[in-house]
Amino acid sequence: MKIWDTKHECMPREELEQLQLERLQATLNRAYKNVAFYRKMFHESNIIPEDMQALSGLARIPFTTKEDLRLNYPYGMFAVPLREVVRVHSSSGTTEKSVVVGYTKNDIKAWTNLVARVMTAAGVTRDDMVQITFSYGLYTGAFGFHYGAEAIGASVIPTGTGNTDKQIMIMQDYKTTALVSTPTYAVTLSDRMEKLNVNPKGLSLRVGLFGGEPLSETMRTEIEARLGITATDNYGLSEIIGPGVAGECEHRCGMHIFEDAFIPEIIDPLTGTPLPAGNVGELVLTSLTKEAFPMIRYRTGDLTSLEFAPCKCGRTMVRMNKTMGRSDDMLIIKGVNVFPSQIRTVLTAIVGTEPHYEIVIDRKGAQDCMEIHIEAAEGIFFDEMKMQKAFLEMVEKKIRSVIGLSATVKLVAPNTVTLKEGKSGLVIDRRTM
């Protein structure tokens, strides 16, 4: 499979780190001179950008958080005058104001190159018809993939969101070969095809690039089986650049982070201490090429780990594993950091779909204890006690192996777990009641 930017994606580690340092120095100087927030931060931390002579010095700089971005809404974090900003996007904002990000002409060029890398790694070529079902609005997803596909030379079908029946008709008539969507929308398309008696084997689809939400291995398997495609994962966020931060190659053993454009770190979500390679923690990113909106040690809130071992594809960039959830969901049980998303992933993998469940944490005497209640449903109901016991023991063993703690798992009657809208899992922490 081809590599879009061999010069940078396959750069020897020593050369890559030298490039990172040079670009980091330029980014720090740009932020110091042009962004009041960073100038104040550097003064208070006694940091002089010119003194940054090693990548290890990055750890001295305080973090940038989403709250910092909101407090500087809308243009306080911009490092160039508005006359140099050719594009404005924003992150999703429901109850609060969105984070507004800007791009210069050079930012757009760099972004296009990065997304072209992601799409090439996924197998997209100039011969593909790429159907993009993301929203063409203030969010970054659709435009990022649009320009990346065009840079490769592929044909773009900018359908945008909604109108599932028409999306399917276009797939059939336009001979779509590559689908860009969220994983859940791919499942929605599959469901609708079944109702319309559309056989996916009659389509030209061969690859899917999925983002906007986590792609679990269970969902990947389902999408590939139902649509007859190869499903690839990628990672990006509006605050950093949009799609184009990282993407899977054909070996699908983690998403390559494009380190010539971003410096990744993994930190302990509680202490902020950098963690060694292989440890699960919160992903922190520093942009190295952004002109309009440089981000320095931005706390993404996403939990993952990094893998530096060489990849068979030839790319030398570090790989990030699938995000495991959000750091703001973290629980501390018996001194161990536990993320509800870890439990959700285990249950989904075992059951085949995400069941309704609740995690109940309590304290008996001086000891914390955890119970997981799973609603009995089709596929996980056992009228024989022996089968039920074996199932519960299997779930308990798997959860223990993932989170490092024991939990008691129980089957409960349907409709006994009271869930928040849009959620399938609920956390009840009785230690705080």
Image: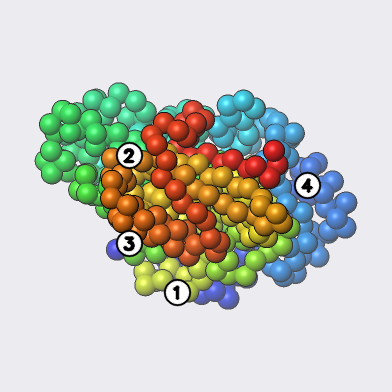
Residue annotated with mark 3:
250
Q: Under tag 3, what secondary structure? A: loop
Could you say where residue 326 lies in the image, as x and y percent from the top left?
Answer: 57, 47
Mark with earlier residue (1, 2): 1
Q: Quadrant of the N terminus?
A: bottom left
| 79 left or right, relative to 143 | right
Residue annotated with mark 2:
377
- Viewer-closest of 355 and 127: 355
Q: Is there a contact, CB below 8 Å, between mark 1 and mark 2?
A: no
Task: Residue type at mark 1: give it.
Answer: Pro
Q: Is there a contact, CB below 8 Å, between mark 3 and mark 4?
A: no
Marks 1 and 2 sit apart, C-alpha to C-alpha, by 43 Å
Q: For residue 310, which numbered disc appears in the image? A: 1
Mark with earlier residue (3, 4): 4
Look at 38% across and 43% down and name the residue there.
354
Mark with earlier residue (4, 2): 4
| 32 left or right, relative to 341 | right
Q: Is there a contact, CB below 8 Å, between mark 3 and mark 1?
A: no
Q: Nearer the viewer, mark 3 or mark 2?
A: 2
Residue 352 can be seen in this image: no
Could you say where residue 369 lies in the image, as x and y percent from the top left?
Answer: 60, 54
Q: For residue 38, which numbered disc appears in the image? A: 4
Q: Under tag 2, what secondary structure? A: loop
Task: Residue type at mark 2: give it.
Answer: Ala
Marks 3 and 1 sit apart, C-alpha to C-alpha, by 14 Å
Q: Nearer the viewer, mark 3 or mark 4?
A: 3
Q: Is there a contact, CB below 8 Å, between mark 4 and mark 1?
A: no
Could you say where residue 176 lies in the image, as x and y percent from the top left?
Answer: 22, 39
